[in-house]
Image: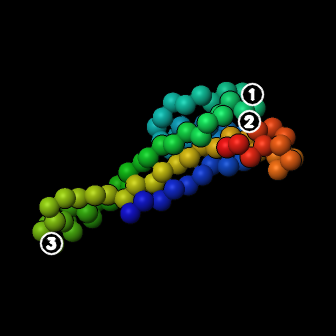
């Protein structure tokens, strides 16, 4: 099972810093608008101590934990729908 979550917000408010903290990545987190142009994607496994026990009970050959994909998207400014900032190019 997987889940995708987009980190969306105004420019220069810490979206990339949050992304780095959640994914343990090291993408550019700069103090200027639009440091992120292309979306950054990080995949994180969801720890679940019950999986090993369930695998034993049901005789599973393989254990596949759930994962969450976090997507760091460029900041959205007022007027983006009319092309301001990066517009809708993200």
Indicate which disc, 3 or 1, sits on the residue closer to the N terminus.
1
Q: Dot 2 corresponds to which residue?
A: 12
Q: Dot 1 corresponds to which residue?
A: 32
Taking 86 as reference, is 40 left or right?
Answer: left
Q: Position of residue 28 (x, y in %)?
A: 59, 28
Circle 3 SS class? helix
Quadrant for residue 61, please give it: bottom left
Q: Residue 57 carries which label?
A: 3
- Badge 1 local density, few (<14 within 10 Å), some, or many (20+)? few
Circle 1 SS class? loop
Q: How many labels does the image show?
A: 3
Quadrant for residue 47, please give it: bottom left
- Badge 3 local density, few (<14 within 10 Å), some, or many (20+)? few
In the rendered image, the vertical position of residue 32 relative to residue 7, given as above or below: above
Colouring rule applied to residues: rainbow
Q: Residue at x 86, y 47 (%)?
A: 82
Taking 72 as reference, is 83 left or right?
Answer: right
Residues at discs 1 and 2 in contact (Cβ within 8 Å): yes
């Amino acid at each position: 099972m997987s889940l995708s979550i987009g980190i969306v917000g105004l420019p220069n408010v810490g979206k990339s810093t949050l992304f780095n903290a959640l994914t343990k990545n090291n993408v550019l987190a700069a103090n200027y608008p639009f440091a992120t142009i292309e979306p950054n994607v990080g995949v994180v496994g969801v720890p679940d101590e019950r999986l090993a026990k369930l695998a034993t009970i049901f005789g599973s050959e393989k254990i596949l934990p759930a994962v969450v994909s976090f997507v760091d998207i460029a900041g959205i400014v007022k007027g983006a729908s009319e092309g301001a900032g990066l517009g809708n190019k993200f």
